[in-house]
Image (cartoon, grey):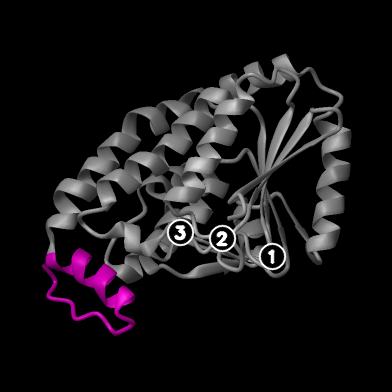
Amino acid sequence: MADKILIESLHDGQVVSLTLNAPKANVLDAEMMTDLQKALDGLAEQPDVKIVTFTGAGDHFSFGASVPEHTKEKAPEMLRQFHGLFYALADLAIPTAALISGQCLGGGMELALMCNFLFADKSAKLGQPEIQLGVFAPPASLLLAMKIGQAKADDLLLTGRAASADEAHAMGLVAQVFEDRESMMAGVEAWAEKHILPRSASSLRYAVKAARLEFNNVVKNKLQQQERMYLDELMATHDANEGIQSFLERRKPEWKNE
Protein backbone atom coordinates (compact mmCIF):
# COMPACT_ATOMS: atom_id res chain seq x y z
CA MET A 1 0.00 0.00 0.00
CA ALA A 2 1.30 3.47 -0.91
CA ASP A 3 2.33 5.83 1.86
CA LYS A 4 -0.53 8.13 2.78
CA ILE A 5 1.88 11.02 3.37
CA LEU A 6 4.44 11.81 0.69
CA ILE A 7 7.50 13.68 1.97
CA GLU A 8 9.70 15.73 -0.32
CA SER A 9 12.73 17.77 0.75
CA LEU A 10 13.49 20.81 -1.40
CA HIS A 11 15.99 23.66 -1.54
CA ASP A 12 18.71 21.66 0.23
CA GLY A 13 16.36 20.69 3.04
CA GLN A 14 15.02 24.18 3.69
CA VAL A 15 11.53 23.29 2.45
CA VAL A 16 9.65 20.10 3.33
CA SER A 17 6.56 19.29 1.31
CA LEU A 18 3.98 16.97 2.89
CA THR A 19 1.31 15.66 0.52
CA LEU A 20 -1.90 14.00 1.69
CA ASN A 21 -1.80 11.00 -0.61
CA ALA A 22 -5.16 9.22 -0.76
CA PRO A 23 -6.99 10.79 -3.70
CA LYS A 24 -9.58 11.71 -4.55
CA ALA A 25 -10.80 12.57 -1.05
CA ASN A 26 -7.49 12.52 0.90
CA VAL A 27 -9.47 11.53 3.99
CA LEU A 28 -7.58 12.01 7.25
CA ASP A 29 -8.18 8.52 8.59
CA ALA A 30 -6.19 6.81 11.34
CA GLU A 31 -3.58 5.52 8.92
CA MET A 32 -2.99 8.91 7.33
CA MET A 33 -2.84 10.64 10.71
CA THR A 34 -0.27 8.10 11.91
CA ASP A 35 1.89 8.77 8.85
CA LEU A 36 1.49 12.52 9.27
CA GLN A 37 2.45 12.36 12.95
CA LYS A 38 5.60 10.42 12.03
CA ALA A 39 6.48 13.03 9.42
CA LEU A 40 6.04 15.86 11.95
CA ASP A 41 8.08 14.01 14.57
CA GLY A 42 10.90 13.68 12.05
CA LEU A 43 10.99 17.42 11.44
CA ALA A 44 12.08 18.08 15.02
CA GLU A 45 15.52 16.70 14.13
CA GLN A 46 15.93 18.87 11.01
CA PRO A 47 17.21 22.31 12.11
CA ASP A 48 17.57 23.62 8.55
CA VAL A 49 13.85 23.44 7.69
CA LYS A 50 12.42 26.91 7.16
CA ILE A 51 8.91 26.05 6.00
CA VAL A 52 6.63 23.02 5.77
CA THR A 53 3.96 22.94 3.07
CA PHE A 54 0.81 20.81 3.00
CA THR A 55 -0.92 19.83 -0.24
CA GLY A 56 -3.41 17.21 -1.34
CA ALA A 57 -2.72 14.72 -4.10
CA GLY A 58 -5.11 14.99 -7.03
CA ASP A 59 -7.84 17.59 -7.38
CA HIS A 60 -8.70 18.11 -3.70
CA PHE A 61 -6.89 19.10 -0.53
CA SER A 62 -8.99 16.92 1.79
CA PHE A 63 -12.63 16.04 2.40
CA GLY A 64 -11.81 15.87 6.12
CA ALA A 65 -11.48 13.24 8.82
CA SER A 66 -12.99 9.78 8.41
CA VAL A 67 -16.70 9.84 9.24
CA PRO A 68 -16.76 6.12 10.20
CA GLU A 69 -14.15 7.00 12.85
CA HIS A 70 -16.52 9.63 14.32
CA THR A 71 -18.88 7.07 15.84
CA LYS A 72 -19.31 7.17 19.61
CA GLU A 73 -17.08 4.13 20.09
CA LYS A 74 -14.26 5.34 17.87
CA ALA A 75 -14.39 9.11 18.47
CA PRO A 76 -12.14 9.15 21.59
CA GLU A 77 -9.18 7.60 19.79
CA MET A 78 -9.83 9.59 16.62
CA LEU A 79 -9.84 12.92 18.47
CA ARG A 80 -6.79 11.99 20.55
CA GLN A 81 -4.85 11.19 17.41
CA PHE A 82 -6.14 14.15 15.40
CA HIS A 83 -5.59 16.73 18.12
CA GLY A 84 -2.09 15.35 18.66
CA LEU A 85 -1.21 16.76 15.22
CA PHE A 86 -2.12 20.26 16.39
CA TYR A 87 -0.01 19.97 19.52
CA ALA A 88 2.90 18.70 17.42
CA LEU A 89 2.63 21.62 14.99
CA ALA A 90 2.49 24.09 17.86
CA ASP A 91 5.61 22.59 19.43
CA LEU A 92 7.55 22.48 16.16
CA ALA A 93 7.10 26.22 15.59
CA ILE A 94 8.22 25.89 11.97
CA PRO A 95 6.41 28.18 9.50
CA THR A 96 3.71 26.24 7.67
CA ALA A 97 1.65 26.81 4.54
CA ALA A 98 -1.39 25.02 3.14
CA LEU A 99 -1.74 24.99 -0.66
CA ILE A 100 -5.41 24.36 -1.33
CA SER A 101 -7.14 23.06 -4.42
CA GLY A 102 -10.68 21.72 -4.57
CA GLN A 103 -12.50 20.62 -1.44
CA CYS A 104 -10.90 21.62 1.86
CA LEU A 105 -13.44 20.52 4.43
CA GLY A 106 -13.80 19.41 8.03
CA GLY A 107 -10.58 18.05 9.47
CA GLY A 108 -8.76 18.99 6.28
CA MET A 109 -9.83 22.58 6.76
CA GLU A 110 -8.72 22.43 10.40
CA LEU A 111 -5.26 21.22 9.37
CA ALA A 112 -5.07 24.16 6.95
CA LEU A 113 -6.26 26.55 9.67
CA MET A 114 -3.35 25.53 11.86
CA CYS A 115 -0.92 26.71 9.18
CA ASN A 116 0.62 30.18 9.22
CA PHE A 117 -0.26 30.78 5.59
CA LEU A 118 -3.11 29.56 3.39
CA PHE A 119 -2.91 29.80 -0.39
CA ALA A 120 -5.66 28.65 -2.74
CA ASP A 121 -6.52 28.34 -6.38
CA LYS A 122 -9.89 29.21 -7.92
CA SER A 123 -11.18 25.65 -7.49
CA ALA A 124 -10.92 25.76 -3.70
CA LYS A 125 -13.94 25.40 -1.43
CA LEU A 126 -13.27 25.83 2.29
CA GLY A 127 -15.74 24.83 4.97
CA GLN A 128 -16.61 23.15 8.25
CA PRO A 129 -19.68 21.01 7.43
CA GLU A 130 -19.71 19.16 10.77
CA ILE A 131 -22.97 20.77 11.92
CA GLN A 132 -24.71 19.07 8.98
CA LEU A 133 -23.83 15.76 10.67
CA GLY A 134 -25.07 16.95 14.05
CA VAL A 135 -21.59 17.49 15.51
CA PHE A 136 -19.10 20.36 15.81
CA ALA A 137 -15.46 20.89 14.88
CA PRO A 138 -13.32 21.23 18.03
CA PRO A 139 -10.12 22.76 16.53
CA ALA A 140 -11.99 25.01 14.09
CA SER A 141 -14.23 26.25 16.89
CA LEU A 142 -11.07 27.75 18.41
CA LEU A 143 -8.96 28.58 15.37
CA LEU A 144 -11.47 30.25 13.07
CA ALA A 145 -12.37 33.05 15.47
CA MET A 146 -8.69 33.80 16.08
CA LYS A 147 -8.06 33.86 12.33
CA ILE A 148 -11.05 35.78 10.94
CA GLY A 149 -13.07 37.07 13.90
CA GLN A 150 -16.08 35.69 15.73
CA ALA A 151 -18.82 36.80 13.33
CA LYS A 152 -17.24 35.20 10.27
CA ALA A 153 -16.32 32.11 12.30
CA ASP A 154 -19.92 31.75 13.50
CA ASP A 155 -21.11 31.95 9.90
CA LEU A 156 -19.00 29.02 8.75
CA LEU A 157 -19.30 26.92 11.92
CA LEU A 158 -23.06 27.24 12.43
CA THR A 159 -24.23 26.98 8.82
CA GLY A 160 -21.73 24.39 7.60
CA ARG A 161 -21.49 26.15 4.25
CA ALA A 162 -18.31 26.29 2.20
CA ALA A 163 -16.63 29.52 1.09
CA SER A 164 -15.02 30.01 -2.29
CA ALA A 165 -11.36 30.89 -2.57
CA ASP A 166 -12.22 34.51 -3.32
CA GLU A 167 -14.57 34.76 -0.33
CA ALA A 168 -11.97 33.15 1.94
CA HIS A 169 -9.46 35.71 0.66
CA ALA A 170 -11.86 38.55 1.38
CA MET A 171 -12.32 37.19 4.91
CA GLY A 172 -8.56 37.37 5.45
CA LEU A 173 -8.30 33.60 5.74
CA VAL A 174 -6.45 32.98 2.46
CA ALA A 175 -3.33 35.02 1.75
CA GLN A 176 -3.47 34.79 -2.04
CA VAL A 177 -5.67 33.23 -4.72
CA PHE A 178 -4.24 31.81 -7.93
CA GLU A 179 -5.95 30.94 -11.19
CA ASP A 180 -5.17 27.21 -11.05
CA ARG A 181 -3.12 24.63 -9.20
CA GLU A 182 -0.08 24.98 -11.44
CA SER A 183 0.13 28.73 -10.98
CA MET A 184 -0.40 28.31 -7.23
CA MET A 185 2.52 25.90 -6.92
CA ALA A 186 4.77 28.23 -8.90
CA GLY A 187 3.53 31.32 -7.09
CA VAL A 188 4.09 29.90 -3.62
CA GLU A 189 7.54 28.71 -4.68
CA ALA A 190 8.43 32.26 -5.73
CA TRP A 191 6.91 33.67 -2.53
CA ALA A 192 8.95 31.33 -0.35
CA GLU A 193 12.16 32.10 -2.24
CA LYS A 194 11.58 35.81 -1.66
CA HIS A 195 10.16 35.92 1.86
CA ILE A 196 11.18 32.73 3.73
CA LEU A 197 14.34 31.12 2.37
CA PRO A 198 16.56 34.20 2.92
CA ARG A 199 15.76 34.09 6.66
CA SER A 200 17.46 32.18 9.46
CA ALA A 201 15.75 28.87 10.21
CA SER A 202 16.34 29.19 13.95
CA SER A 203 15.15 32.80 14.02
CA LEU A 204 12.03 31.87 12.07
CA ARG A 205 11.15 29.34 14.75
CA TYR A 206 11.51 31.92 17.50
CA ALA A 207 9.44 34.34 15.42
CA VAL A 208 6.69 31.73 15.09
CA LYS A 209 6.76 31.06 18.83
CA ALA A 210 6.53 34.79 19.55
CA ALA A 211 3.84 35.55 17.00
CA ARG A 212 1.76 32.57 18.11
CA LEU A 213 2.24 32.77 21.86
CA GLU A 214 -1.45 33.42 22.57
CA PHE A 215 -2.64 31.33 19.62
CA ASN A 216 -0.74 28.26 20.81
CA ASN A 217 -1.80 28.83 24.42
CA VAL A 218 -5.41 28.61 23.26
CA VAL A 219 -4.70 25.45 21.26
CA LYS A 220 -2.89 23.72 24.10
CA ASN A 221 -5.19 24.79 26.92
CA LYS A 222 -8.62 24.95 25.30
CA LEU A 223 -8.62 22.13 22.76
CA GLN A 224 -8.80 19.53 25.54
CA GLN A 225 -11.91 21.29 26.86
CA GLN A 226 -13.52 21.12 23.43
CA GLU A 227 -12.58 17.44 23.20
CA ARG A 228 -14.24 16.66 26.51
CA MET A 229 -17.39 18.56 25.51
CA TYR A 230 -17.50 16.59 22.27
CA LEU A 231 -17.01 13.19 23.88
CA ASP A 232 -18.81 13.56 27.21
CA GLU A 233 -21.71 15.81 26.23
CA LEU A 234 -22.28 15.98 22.47
CA MET A 235 -21.85 12.24 21.86
CA ALA A 236 -24.31 11.51 24.66
CA THR A 237 -27.08 13.12 22.57
CA HIS A 238 -29.37 11.31 20.16
CA ASP A 239 -28.86 13.75 17.32
CA ALA A 240 -25.06 13.61 17.21
CA ASN A 241 -25.17 9.83 16.85
CA GLU A 242 -28.07 10.03 14.41
CA GLY A 243 -26.20 12.52 12.24
CA ILE A 244 -23.15 10.28 11.93
CA GLN A 245 -25.22 7.14 11.40
CA SER A 246 -27.47 8.71 8.78
CA PHE A 247 -24.41 9.84 6.82
CA LEU A 248 -22.98 6.32 6.90
CA GLU A 249 -26.35 4.91 5.81
CA ARG A 250 -26.73 7.57 3.09
CA ARG A 251 -30.09 8.81 4.33
CA LYS A 252 -31.60 12.01 5.67
CA PRO A 253 -31.14 12.41 9.44
CA GLU A 254 -34.16 12.23 11.70
CA TRP A 255 -33.47 14.84 14.37
CA LYS A 256 -35.16 14.66 17.78
CA ASN A 257 -33.55 17.89 18.94
CA GLU A 258 -32.10 16.07 21.90
Disc nearest the viewer among 2 and 3: 2
Q: Quadrant of residue 62?
A: bottom right
The residue nearer to you, when weighing 151 against 184, is: 184
Badge 1 element = loop
**What is the number of the mark on residue 243?**
none
Above or below, comparing residue 157 to residue 59 in the picture:
above
Sequence-wise first label, 1 or 3: 1
- Amino acid type at circle 2 is Asn
Disc nearest the viewer among 1 and 3: 1
Q: CA distance from mark 2 to mark 3?
A: 12 Å
Q: Is residue 149 visible?
A: no
Q: Which residue is under mark 1?
A: 58
Q: Residue at x 80, y 56 (%)?
A: 184
Q: CA distance from mark 1 to mark 3?
A: 18 Å
The residue nearer to you, when weighing 221 against 78, is: 78
Q: Which residue is under mark 3?
A: 106
Q: Residue at x 42, y 26 (%)?
A: 217
Q: Residue at x 53, y 42 (%)?
A: 35
Above or below, comparing residue 74 to residue 91 in the picture:
below
- Amino acid type at circle 1 is Gly
Q: Which residue is under mark 2?
A: 26
Badge 3 element = helix
Q: Which residues are magenta?
A: 238-258
